[in-house]
């Protein structure tokens, strides 16, 4: 739909809305691509929020949008292909994002639609430790309702993309549809591979201005004074984002700010579903699982008898939330990719001084991505699933996600010799540090699984298979010995 540049934004938006009713899907996407190429950012700015909502659905779940969770190549090959091409990291939609990013536009995202503990924290004017929210909270204008986050176009797009897994969870998925074959699942995988690459660097964003640069986010003055839970920032990018306004000043910032932003949004939207009190206990990114567990055990003495275990007390902190099997499959995809991403870290040089001069921001990100950004939140998410999931075979999705996290060596680049493929591999001592840092994942959750197994009908082959899967993983040579060597602080 090539239109004259003299069109008013309101007319452009009205035309696109009319096309949604009158034109087939493929034609609408083709027209949108033309609009994105030909119209200036000033006019595209007004249609961006509508376009994002029309793709991913409304935050209240009423508007389904493109229903990417149900869109599959086997049943709708044309729409599936067109949607993936349009939303690809190098596709028209992302070109629109970067076109608007270059002009530093901001878009409001209602705080009321954030996960429970994050929403409660911000509404109490306590800024979450996560750098994703820093300098973004805006009080409503006179007479307005609710707080908003002022997001840049990339953040706004990814917020909607990630949260649509939650807000659209009530949309019925037919039994013949496999979540792992949906357009949504494929896009999550595509974005992870693009922005957290295991090989090479993050591809630079496409620019409509040859030789031009897309600026990284610039700091904004806080609209409201906030206190903070901790003294440390989780962001690796404090130096880049807070003090470097553009890529021209520091090209390394362009390499990593999208990577960290993407991961933080995925983690914030998918793994934060418990109470504000629990959220407060998890704020410091440097708190290890053992310390978190200790905090819970101390808290349990104030919420019940002193003998009450922290495993039981944990559930008192969680809000009512029932993740779907599709949600768990997406989290497992995230876990597997993060292991591969982390394991692609280049070997450290022999000279410590050489490391400080040669390590790129992306390499530093790989070094801390799991312990700093994912470990605590995934542990609580798994605790919740172990304690609340129905006692049936659908738990297999949770089980495989847990087992994926426990075995980072499965996603390491080295391959076993072909002659040893039929023999169980001994877990290398190089993984001892990971096992000790994640000891509760191997011990407390194992006990949680046993408690479930004792209450499960093991006559069912599917349930018995889950017990076999866990036994097979924990029976890997040398794994039990490394778990036993773990240092408990209780």
Image (tube, helix red, strand yellow):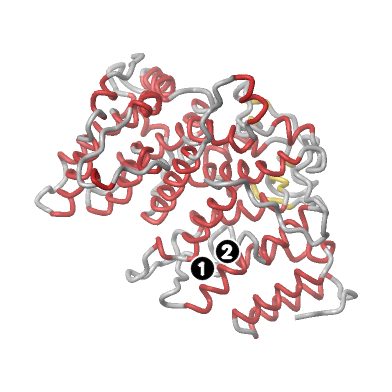
The residue at the far top in this view is 489
Front position in the image: 386 or 305: 386
What residue is rendered at 56% in x and 67% in y? 63
Q: Are marks 2 and 1 in contact (CB under 8 Å)?
A: yes
Image vertical order of residue 35 relative to residue 468, above or below: below
Residue at far bottom of view: 22
Q: Which numbered circle lies on residue 57?
A: 2
Q: Secondary structure at mark 2?
A: loop
Pick whichever, 360 or 15, lies toward us.
360
- Disc 2 versus disc 1: nearer the observer: 1
The residue at the point 61 percent across, 51 percent down is 159
The residue that appears at 71% across and 39% down in the rendered structure is 252
Residue pictured at 42% horizontal, 25% vertical:
289
Quadrant of the rendered image containing residue 416:
top left
Indicate left or right for 420 with 454 as reference: right
At which x and y percent is residue 218? 79, 40
- Which element type, helix, strand or loop, lies under badge 1? loop
Query: Whole-percent x and y of residue 152?
Result: 73, 49
What is the distance, in whole Å, between disc 2 and disc 1 at their CAs?
8 Å
Tell me the tag on residue 67.
Answer: 1
In the image, is residue 461 above or below residue 85? above
Position of the N terminus, as image quadrant, is bottom right
């Amino acid at each position: 739909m090539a239109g004259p540049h003299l069109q008013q934004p309101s007319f452009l938006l009205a035309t696109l809305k009319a096309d949604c009713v009158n034109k087939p899907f493929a034609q609408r996407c083709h027209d949108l691509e033309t609009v994105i190429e030909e119209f200036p950012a000033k006019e595209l700015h007004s249609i961006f929020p509508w376009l994002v909502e029309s793709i991913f659905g409304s935050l209240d779940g009423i508007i389904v949008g493109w229903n990417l969770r149900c869109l599959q190549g086997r049943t709708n090959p044309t729409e599936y292909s067109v949607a993936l091409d349009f939303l690809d990291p190098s596709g028209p939609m992302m070109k629109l994002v970067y076109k608007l990013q270059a002009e530093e536009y901001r878009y409001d995202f209602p705080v009321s639609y954030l996960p429970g503990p994050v929403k409660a924290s911000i509404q109490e004017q306590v800024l979450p430790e996560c750098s994703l929210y820093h300098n973004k909270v805006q009080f409503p204008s006179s007479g307005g309702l609710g707080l908003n986050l002022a997001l840049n176009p990339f953040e706004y797009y990814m917020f909607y993309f990630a949260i649509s897994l939650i807000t659209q969870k009530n949309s019925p998925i037919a039994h013949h549809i496999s979540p792992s074959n949906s357009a949504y699942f494929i896009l999550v995988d595509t974005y992870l591979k693009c922005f957290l690459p295991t090989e090479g660097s993050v591809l630079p964003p496409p620019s409509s201005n040859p030789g031009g640069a897309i600026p990284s986010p610039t700091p904004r003055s806080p609209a409201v004074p906030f206190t903070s839970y901790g003294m440390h920032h989780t962001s690796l990018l404090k130096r880049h984002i807070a003090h470097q306004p553009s890529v021209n000043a520091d090209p390394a910032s362009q390499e990593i700010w999208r990577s960290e932003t993407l991961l933080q949004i995925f983690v914030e939207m998918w793994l934060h579903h418990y109470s504000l009190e629990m959220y407060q206990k998890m704020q410091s990114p440097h708190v290890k699982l053992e310390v978190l567990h200790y905090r819970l055990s101390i808290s349990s003495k104030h919420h019940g008898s002193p003998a009450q275990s922290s495993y039981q007390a944990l559930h008192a902190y969680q809000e009512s939330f029932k993740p779907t099997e599709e949600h768990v499959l997406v989290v497992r995809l995230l876990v597997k990719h993060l292991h591969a991403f982390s394991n692609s870290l280049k070997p450290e040089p022999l000279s410590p001084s050489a490391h400080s001069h040669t390590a790129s921001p992306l390499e530093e990100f790989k070094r801390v991505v799991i312990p700093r950004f994912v470990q605590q939140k995934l542990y609580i998410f798994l605790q919740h699933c172990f304690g609340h999931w129905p006692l049936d075979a659908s738990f297999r999705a949770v089980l495989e996600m847990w087992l994926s996290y426990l075995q980072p060596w499965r996603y390491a680049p080295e391959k076993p010799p072909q002659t040893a493929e039929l023999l169980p591999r001994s877990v290398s001592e190089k993984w001892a540090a990971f096992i000790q840092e994640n000891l509760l994942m191997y011990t407390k959750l194992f006990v949680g699984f046993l408690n479930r197994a004792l209450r499960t009908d093991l006559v069912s082959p599917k349930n018995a298979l889950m017990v076999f899967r866990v036994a097979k993983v924990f029976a890997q040579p040398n794994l039990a010995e490394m778990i036993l060597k773990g240092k408990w602080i209780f």
